[in-house]
Image (tube, rainbow, N blue to C red):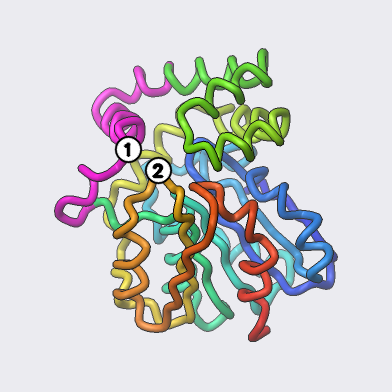
Amino acid sequence: MGFADYGPADGFVVVSAHGGLSCRLDIRGAAPVAEAAGIRLISPDRPGIGLSDPRPGRTVLDWAADVEELADHLGIERMAVLGWSMGGQYAAALGYALASRINRVAIVAGALPLTEDGTFARLTPMDRWCTRMSQRCPSLAAAWFRSLSVLAWSMPKQFARISARTLAPADAEIVHGELQAFAAMAGEGLRIPAGVVEDYRAWARPWGFSPEELQVPVDVWWGDADRLIPKEWPTELATRIPKSTLNIGTGGHFMAHLHYRAILDSLAESA
């Protein structure tokens, strides 16, 4: 398993679950905030992404065993979890499976289980296409992801600018401010196309638990300018998770970049 490690070595640990078409580097922008807050951010690559070995057929819940092994290896007993976008369901899986070791969970711009009626149809056209092609024609999906990877590595600024055109203005502004970092994150996340295919296949499988079964405190975050997640989803998640708090703030799908300190402070407040 590959992972990135930011912040003080003796800080309270927050495990980050990265988004889709991404990798362990997507939390790098929070490193200065984590340092100031005394938080150690550990961001693993999911199987088949970046530096992590593949695991075909994996489920969302399987990831809990991977993170538990990593925590044991690093000598971590207690931790909190932050999951952004596609990573939201993986953060929830840790809260469910490792409840005795989890202080709190933050789900930022996360989705509902895609196996539930009507949920998949509300994804963006790009997410629906990537998921269906990964399920039905993985070789074509892998070729598409490979082409994106080549563009990200060979023309990073152009790749970032093209990507920004598909985003809400609030998100495009963040990408334009971090062109090289955004392209490096995407290029590394797309480095193994077959792993990206499996990531899309996995997120469309049953979670292995329901939001109602989470027993740890959960903060649900959503940006009021987010065009990728329907505004009803964060409210429904917060309603269904027993010990939850709904936080609607400024910004789009990348709203965490504007609210890292508040998110991290909330995760550490009961440490």
Q: In the image, is 1 to the left or to the right of 98? A: right
Cβ atoms under marks 1 and 2 closer than 8 Å: yes
Give the vertical position of 79 relative to 206 (above or below): below
The question of residue 127 being in magenta is answered with yes
Q: Give the labeled residue for mark 2.
A: 227
Q: Secondary structure at mark 1?
A: loop
Amino acid type assigned to the residue bearing label 1 in the image:
Thr
Amino acid type assigned to the residue bearing label 2 in the image:
Arg
Q: Residue at x 47, y 72 (%)?
A: 95
Q: Give the labeled residue for mark 1.
A: 124
Question: Main SS of the magenta segment?
Answer: helix
Which dot marks residue 143?
A: none
Nearest to N terminus: mark 1 or mark 2: 1
Magenta stretch in the rendered image: 115-143
Q: Residue at x 73, y 72 (%)?
A: 75
Q: In the image, is 91 to the left or to the right of 175? A: left
